[in-house]
């Protein structure tokens, strides 16, 4: 079985690709029984946690890592760290805009 995102070979019963972290679409339960991932059995992320992480740690992109937006989280983290914190306010303003506008996580599941 191969990952749909990166093409890496993954085990047939793997829940995620170990290379890119994308869900394979199945979660192994007891024995050989597998169930497909649906919105009903994936835990939702909390909007309150997303907002608080964005307000207090937004310059480091922690809220994006929480919601599954890894690329944006890395960008915000690098902006802050590579500028030794001098451009952290740009990442923080970016985070404030995101917590006001984003209502779903990276899997397109609405926040609760």
Image (cartoon, rainbow, N blue to C red):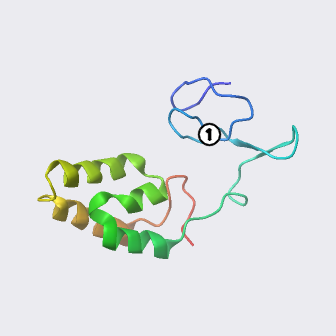
Task: Determine the image quadrant of residue 100.
Answer: bottom left
Q: Nearer the viewer, residue 17 or 98?
A: 17
Q: Nearer the viewer, residue 101 or 48?
A: 48
Q: Position of residue 36 (x, y in %)?
A: 76, 45
Task: Determine the image quadrant of residue 64.
Answer: bottom left
Does residue 3 lie above or below 108 as drawn?
Answer: above
Q: Position of residue 44 (x, y in %)?
A: 60, 64
* Position of residue 34 in the picture relative to residue 90 (left or right): right
Query: Residue at the spot x=57%, y=73% of the render?
Result: 112
Q: Position of residue 101 (x, y in %)?
A: 37, 68
Is disc 1 surrounded by few (<14), some (14 to 19) or many (20+) residues within 10 Å? some
Q: Position of residue 51 (x, y in %)?
A: 40, 73
Q: Residue furthest left?
A: 86
The secondary structure type at the circle numbered 1 is loop
Q: Nearer the viewer, residue 34 or 108?
A: 34
Task: Determine the image quadrant of residue 14.
Answer: top right
Count of picture labels: 1
Does residue 29 lie above or below 109 as drawn?
Answer: above
* Position of residue 10 in the picture relative to residue 57 (left or right): right
Does residue 23 lie above or below 91 as drawn?
Answer: above
Q: Which residue is mark 1?
A: 16
* Position of residue 11 in the picture relative to residue 3 (left or right): right
Query: Residue at the spot x=87%, y=37% of the render?
Result: 32
Quadrant containing the N terminus is top right
Q: Residue furthest front?
A: 84
* Position of residue 94 in the picture relative to residue 38 (left or right): left
Query: Residue at the spot x=74%, y=34% of the render?
Result: 13
Does residue 36 lie above or below 96 as drawn?
Answer: above
């Amino acid at each position: 079985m191969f990952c749909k995102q990166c093409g890496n070979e993954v085990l047939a019963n793997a829940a995620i690709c170990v290379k890119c972290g994308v869900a394979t679409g199945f979660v192994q339960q007891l024995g050989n029984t597998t169930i497909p991932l649906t919105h009903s059995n994936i835990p939702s992320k909390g909007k309150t946690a997303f907002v608080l992480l964005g307000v207090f740690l937004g310059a480091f992109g922690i809220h994006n890592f929480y919601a599954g937006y890894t690329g944006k989280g890395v960008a915000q983290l690098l902006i802050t760290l590579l500028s030794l914190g001098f451009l952290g306010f740009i990442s923080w303003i970016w985070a404030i805009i995101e917590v006001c506008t984003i209502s779903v996580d990276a899997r397109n599941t609405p926040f609760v």
